[in-house]
Image (cartoon, helix red, strand yellow):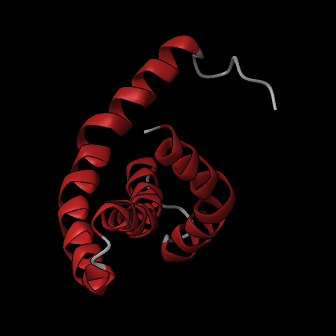
Amino acid sequence: MPPAYCCALVLDWFVVSGPAKKVAFRLLPTFASPLKTVMTVSTCMVLPMVFFMSLYGAIEGLSHTQAWNQLLLLWGTNSLKNVAMALPFQLLIAGPLVRKVFRRLFPEGTILD
């Protein structure tokens, strides 16, 4: 589990975050609602993370079985399952919960640039 966490952290911070935000803000109109902005950025973050972490999981699983000819099949099925779980979880549960906790800890107007 720790190697997967480290891989996810590095991918999120250094690979996915910047391009995902650029794509999200290109897709949004200039004055999009905060909800539309949050949903678009979250979706643009989740999809590439699912892509990369599904590959990580497939490689991890196949490293035990050595059935490398199954890589694309396993990666594809993992990706579909993970999108079906990760995207609704992020949009409906994790994202709103984290934003609520963040706003409790740091009320609007209390964070300096």
Q: Is residue 111 left or right of residue 59?
A: right
Q: Residue 24 location, x and y as percent?
A: 52, 68
Q: Position of residue 57 (x, y in %)?
A: 35, 60
Quadrant housing the N terminus: top left
Where residue 112 appears, as percent x and y from the top left, is 79, 25
Residue at image location 37% in from the left, 38% down from the top: 95
Q: Residue at x 67, y 21 (%)?
A: 109
Which residue is most to the right? 113
Instruction: Indicate left or right for 27 with 36 as reference.
Output: right
Between residue 76 and residue 60, name the one nearer to us. 60
Above or below, comparing residue 104 to residue 65 in the picture: above
Residue 108 vs 90, above or below: the answer is: above
Q: Residue at x 20, y 53 (%)?
A: 85
Residue found at the far top of this picture? 105
- Please tell me how many numbered marks the rendered image carries: 0
Relative to 61, residue 93 above or below? above
Q: Which of the 4 image quarters holds residue 107?
A: top right
Camera-side residue of 61 and 57: 61
**In the image, 18: left or right of 66?**
right
Q: Residue at x 41, y 60 (%)?
A: 53
Q: In which quadrant is the C terminus drawn?
A: top right
Eyeballing the image, is 33 above or below 26?
A: above
Return the residue nearer the eye: 72 or 82: 72
Residue 15: % across, % down: 64, 64
For residue 26, side relative to residue 74 (left or right): right
Q: Which of 111 and 12 lies nearest the eye of the viewer?
A: 12
